[in-house]
Amino acid sequence: MRKVIVTAALTGNMVVPTQTEYLPYKPDHIAEEARRCWEAGAAIIHIHPRDPENGRPVPSIELFGELLTKIKAKCDAVVCPSTGGGPGMSVEHRVAVVRRYRPEIASFNTGSMNFGMFNIVKRYSEFKFSWERDYLESTRDFVFKNTFSDLQYMGSVFRETGTKPELEIYDVGHLYNVAFMVSEGWIELPIHIQFVLGVLGGIGASIENLLHLKSVATRLFQDRFTWSVTGIGYPAEFVMATHGMLVGGHVRVGLEDNIKLSPGILAKSNAELVEKVVKIARNLDFDIATPDEARDILGLKGMDKVGY
C-alpha cells in the first residue's frame, strides 16, 4: 500500500477569527491542535504565528520559536514553518525563522502574484476584531512579492541550514521558476512541491488544473520530485485531496485552507479535517505515513538536526 503523507495547516494568514470561532491563535491552543492532528494521522504540521490576543497574523520570530518548541514537546511530527511573511516584510525577515531554528522543512514561495482575500469582506456585516476588515480589504492592492533576487537569497539560506524547501506552487509559471532555480543551483533535486489551488490570484481548484500541474512538473523534473496538494475552501480541499492521492500525490488539509467539514458545517478543529481525509485515504486503500516515514520519503535531515 502506498504511503500518503498528510499535512495539517493549522492557521495560515488568510482566515480571520470572524469566519470561525475554532481558528486557533494562542500558542498553547495551536500546539494542542498540532498534537491532535498528529494523533489523527498528520505527519507534517504547517504553522504560521498569530497574535495571541486578537488572532492577527504576525511574523514574529519569537512566536515561531515558542510554537516550534511547544509542538516538539507534544509529538514527533515534522514541523514546517511558513516563510510567507506579510505585506512589506523583507525577504531577510521572512526567512529568518529558517536561519534561526533550522527546521527540517519550511515553505518556500516560488513566484510573485496577486493574492486576494478582500472578497471575504462582503460576507460579514460585523467583525470580531477591528483589524480584520482593513486587513482583508488591503489585499485588493497587494502583490505577494517573490522576485528572482528573493528566490536566490531564500535558496542560499535553505542550503546553509540543511532545511528542505516545500515549494509552494500557486500557478503553472511557478514550476518554471523552480526549474530555473534548479538549473542555477539555488535549490537541488529531488524537490518537494506543494500545489495550492484556488487562491484568488492563482490557478483555480479543478481536477483539470491539478493534472496539468502534475504533467508539467513531470516533464520538468521527471521522477525527481514528490508533491502534495490542497484546495482552498470547501469542497475543493477534499476534492483536490482525493484526486491528488489517486494520481500519486500527498495531501494537505487544515483551517488555513478550509473551515468546513461538510456543507454548512464548520470544522470544530483541524483534527476533524485530518480525520476526514485519513478516512478517505483508507477507503481508497492507501496507508497513512508516520512522521518518520514522511522524513524518509521527503529526504529530511531529522529532528536531531533542528535548532530548537
Image: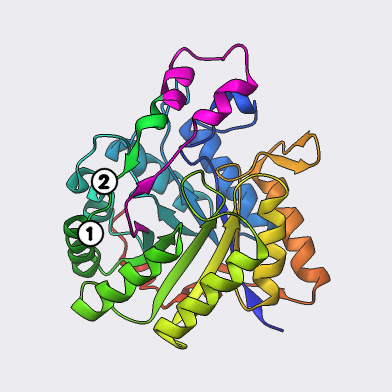
Relative side of 134 to 285, left or right: left
For disc 2, the marked residue is 94
Kindly state the secondary structure of the residue where label 2 is placed.
helix
Q: Position of residue 295 (x, y in %)?
A: 47, 73
Query: Badge 1 local density, few (<14 within 10 Å), some, or many (20+)?
Result: many
Q: Magenta span has 144?
A: no
Q: Between disc 1 and disc 2, whose residue precedes?
A: 2
Query: Badge 2 local density, few (<14 within 10 Å), some, or many (20+)?
Result: some
For disc 1, the marked residue is 154
Q: Is residue 7 above or below residue 129?
A: below
How far apart marks 1 and 2 lie (CA) works out to 9 Å
Mark 1 residue type: Met
Q: Quadrant of residue 278?
A: bottom right
Q: Quadrant of residue 149?
A: bottom left
Looking at the picture, tell me which residue is in the foreground, 69 or 49.
Answer: 49
Q: Is residue 179 above or below residue 291?
A: below
Q: Position of residue 261 (x, y in %)?
A: 75, 43
Q: Position of residue 33 (x, y in %)?
A: 59, 43
Which residue occupies 51% across, 62% down?
195
Mark 2 residue type: Arg
Q: Magenta span has 122?
A: yes
Can residue 117 be seen here? The reply is yes
Q: Which residues are magenta?
A: 108-137
Which residue occupies 46% across, 26% down?
136
Which quadrant of the figure contains the N terminus? bottom right
Q: Is residue 214 above or below residue 272?
A: below
CB within 8 Å, label 1 to label 2: yes
Q: Quadrant of residue 42?
A: bottom right
Relative side of 158 to 169, left or right: left
Which residue occupies 67% across, 65% down?
207
Relative side of 52 to 103, left or right: right
Can residue 296 be seen here? The reply is no
